[in-house]
Image (spheres, rainbow, N blue to C red):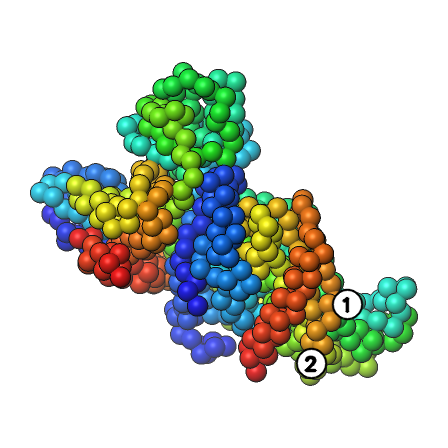
Amino acid sequence: MERVDGRRFDELRPIKIEAGVLKRADGSCYIEWGKNKIYAAVYGPKKVLPRHLEKDDRAILRCRYNMAPFSVEERKRPGPDRRAVEIGKVMQGALEPAILMHYYPKSMIEISVEVVQANAGTRCAGITAVSVALADAGIPMRDLVPSCAAGKVDGQVILDLAKEEDNSGEADMPVAIIPRLNQITLLQMDGKLTEQEVEQAITLAMQGCQQVYQLQIDALRRKYAGAEYE
Amino acid sequence: MHYEENMRVLNMSEILPLIRKEYLISLAKEGKREDERALDEYRPLDIRVNVVDKAEGSALVSLGGTMVFAGIKVDVGEPYPDTPEDGVMITGAELIPMAAPDFEAGPPGEEAVEVARVVDRGIRESKALDTKALCVRENELVRLVFVDLHVMDYDGNLIDACGVAAMSALATCQMPVLDENDKPTEERLPLPVHDLAVPCTFVKLGDSLLLDPSLDEEKALDSRITVATDQEHHVCAMQKSNIGGFSLEEVMHAVRVSTARGEEIRGLMKEAMK
Amino acid sequence: MIYANNKDLVVPGMLLAEGDYINEDGTHKDKGKIYASVVGICYVDHRKIRVVALEGKYIPKSGDTIIGVVTGERLSGWTVDINSPYNASLSQRDIHVGRFDTLKVGDLISAKIVKVTETFDISLYAKRPHGRLNEGILVEIHSSRVPRLIGRRGSMIKLIKEKTGSIISVGQNGLVWIRGGNEELAAQACQMVDREAHIPGLTDRVSGFLSR
């Protein structure tokens, strides 16, 4: 089967990850994933506002996903829509299980993802970038969280759908995992798949996540290359 | 250039410790700044254009640690009734929570609205954008030019960073040519841009005027003034902001410095747009 | 079984050891295996394993000396921002000398953390009158790099003090107050330690910088 950009069925788009790109944020990351260009920032742990959200035994995590008005074909009106709110929520569910939340009772970790150029798969790229930004902020975690989608196009289960494939495809399934725990922490799907295809797609996406995981580790190692205490 | 780019900012609280404010004022009194700049010197300014291919025009500007995207989208719509032959420019700025620990999500606040309006005014009044050339049919259909400013990192002086980003994105914007049914085609045409307006912002610390304030200089400020100039060295927009005042001499000093520095910045913009 | 080498750069989730090892700061244990929790340098000392974080916020500990900013006045004392996820409080009772009315919002103080409760209610004790720091300059560094600024038995900070003639007070929370002598030079030296803390040969570079 020939894909629009000539990739194999199990091949990711080119991915470039850079840790620590923003000055104000406690941790940050820039990711280029195919034609997606996305920034992730982490603030915290910090004081909880509004105060009533405070938990006595753990930190709380707040996630915000936003698209710049010029990031898509048709200008997007500024501010969150229902899609952005939902993505914020599933991102939280994907990332929180990896964070050692009980280390920082009564505090808050704020995460934001800003998409400046979108081309299918922004939530997976966003989660991948946030996870690197969390590590860059020094937040203790069980593991990094890589993310990647699989889907079905022209009857074939394939990895990491590009925009054209997503538009014409039969199904799309974004997945995130905690590799060390072998747990799936993001799973969404739209389209139609048989039981067998579901298993194929999840397996393929998890393999993709393992490749993304390696790129996350490399990005962090690059930032601190040569680090050593006397 | 001695500017120390890696200097950390105090992110801890919005309250600037009093001794920091006193320190910045005492430095300024001697004509010095914490990052070793002269009082009328910009931080390193980096301009990159055509950075977002979904936008018809775009720019990424870094001014010290401040980082801003500008993206242009061109659409068609009805003109305003009082200007039936003019295209419409709509400028918006978002100070997103990514950019600073105290920026809140939600509709633009006072600060964001002021940034967008001052940037808009400089460009509009310089007549940089030929709105008459953006008329498709009088009274009926004109081009709508959306300028969206997306502040990613806030390290002081948003107005100048946003102004340079917006102007650079407009000047390199390629809008789609319309077919006979007013639908956009694949063909592209540059926006009719004939000038490069540049805003220069100063803060007053004690009795000194400091160009391009850093974050803490801005937090310590008594008041702020912005002067936008065009390539003929006309002043095309001004804005005094915050509490505090300026003498006539101070305003004229700001105007003179803005004219000179504006020209240098225009040079950097042209270099980036080559 | 040990998987990490001493002084390895590690990232969260990396397996460091399994079996009969004791996990300390910057690591966590799961089903008998020890993993890194943060980006940092791994230290193996006999059976003890820890990771010194390269980033991260200051977490208050009882006994630490900190520098903070007064952010609020209350009936019985002050709220102090100590550059951490938690505010601290300084009670009038816990100020050594009288004259309680002189601390105000924006003042910088040096204080000792006397108590941190399980839910991070933090009480301070200020030794000098109000612990207020007047004049001088304030520098922020990563709290994780404070040990580097102090140096082995205080060697680094002693070097900077001697070469600049400044009085320097280093808070465990990463705030550094400098007064007198060549304040700017001292501040630059502190920032150099912060920036280059993880690059070998730091003492020589700082010494070279100060002798220039």
Name the spot of residue A150 as percent of width and height, x first: 45, 62
Name the spot of residue B24 as percent of width and height, x first: 49, 49
In the image, A121 versus B153, the foreground residue is B153
Q: Quadrant of residue C58?
A: top left
**Residue at the spot 11% in from the left edge and 43% down from the top edge:** C45
In the image, C45 versus B262, the foreground residue is B262
Q: Residues within 10 Å of mark 2 (few under 14, many from 20)?
A: some
Which quarter of the rendering shows the C terminus of chain B?
A: bottom right
Q: Quadrant of residue B116?
A: bottom right
* Tag in front: 2 or 1: 1
**Residue at the spot 51% in from the left edge and 44% down from the top edge:** B21
Q: Amino acid at mark 2?
A: Pro
Q: Is residue C154 left or right of residue A84?
A: left
Q: Is residue A168 visible?
A: no
Name the spot of residue B175 as percent of width and height, x first: 70, 77
Q: Secondary structure at mark 2?
A: strand
Q: Is residue B59 visible?
A: yes
Q: Is residue A164 left or right of residue B144?
A: left
Look at mark 1 in the image and give the residue it sits on: B125
Do discs 2 and 1 belong to a common subunit?
yes
In the displayed structure, A71 sits above or below C69; it is below
**Residue at the spot 41% in from the left edge and 65% down from the top edge:** B2
Give the label on residue B190, or none.
Answer: 2
Q: Chain of mark 2?
A: B
Q: Chain of mark 1?
A: B
Q: Secondary structure at mark 1?
A: helix
- Asked if the residue under mark 1 is in contact with the one under mark 2, i.e. CB atoms within 8 Å, the reply is no
